[in-house]
Amino acid sequence: MPEMYGLTMNEPALSSCIPLPTDDLFRAIDEYFLSREKLMKVEAFTRAQRQVEGWFKGELIYPFADLLGTQRVSAWEPEATFTPSDKKKCDFILDVLDSRVFLEVKALYHGRQRAAKFGLDIYPYKDTVGIWGDVLKLSSLSSGLGYNLLFIYPKLEPEAWARLIEIYKRRVAPIVLEEVSRITDYLSTLYICKLSVMNGNG
């Protein structure tokens, strides 16, 4: 296991006490991105005031390949359609244990960008900006597990994030969002939020 700089050492990264099929997957993602080497890159992105979503998507290939090599993931595919008859594409689809996991990835940079300053609240709206398109897409799944994987930087106050996500949960109802990670476990400039998305209409 690489040396960790982003998580509290005595607490799990995931909030659920019941093991989930995605626990191993999400732990591997955390271990990869919260190494000193990767955090130095994220800190450079912050200093440059840039949202670098493509970098996060590209880097995810490495932990996914490692998991496939250890047979903890049986298959994974980038930019894959939900089903052969469905034209909607997902950033990543992985087969983990007996579950199919659908991941939509977003980098949520907040702060100054040139002359303007952007708050994190620009992302959670029901419009074409931010994560709404991914939430809506994942809520249409008829089977499998759908998650928004959010790379949020620079560091933000846990109370501010809690308020923001609670407002968004009410805003998107009856779609159900559940945060299966805890921001208080992350000590670094980067919070890797795992947001489960489900259709509340059953």
Image (tube, rainbow, N blue to C red):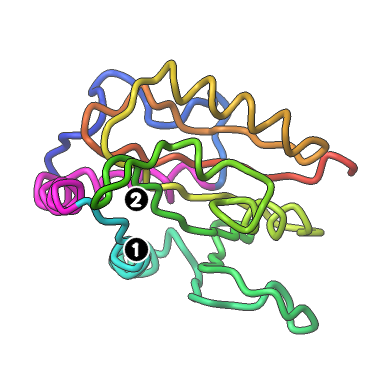
Mark count: 2
Q: Is residue 179 above or below residue 147?
A: above
Q: Residues within 10 Å of mark 2 (few under 14, many from 20)?
A: some
Tag 2 and tag 1, C-beta contact below 8 Å = yes
**Left or right side of 114 for 191:** right
Mark 1 — residue? Answer: 60
Q: Secondary structure at mark 2?
A: helix
Residue at mark 2: 29
- Main SS, magenta region, reads helix
Q: Quadrant of residue 8?
A: top left
Percent position (x, y) of residue 191?
34, 37
Which three-letter amino acid code belongs to the residue tagged 1? Answer: Leu
Residue at the image point whose x is 55% and y is 50% from the top: 148
Placement of the C terminus among the 4 image quadrants: top right
Tell me the quadrant of the picture where the N terminus can be found: top left
Q: Is residue 40 above or below residue 92?
A: above
Q: Residue furthest bottom?
A: 84
Q: Which residues are magenta?
A: 22-48
Q: Is residue 44 visible?
A: yes
The label on residue 83 is: none
Q: Where is residue 17 shown, x and y percent of the image?
A: 53, 23
Q: Amino acid at mark 2?
A: Ile
Q: Residue furthest right?
A: 201
Nearer to us in this view, 39 or 130: 130
Give the camera-side residue of 130 and 30.
Answer: 130
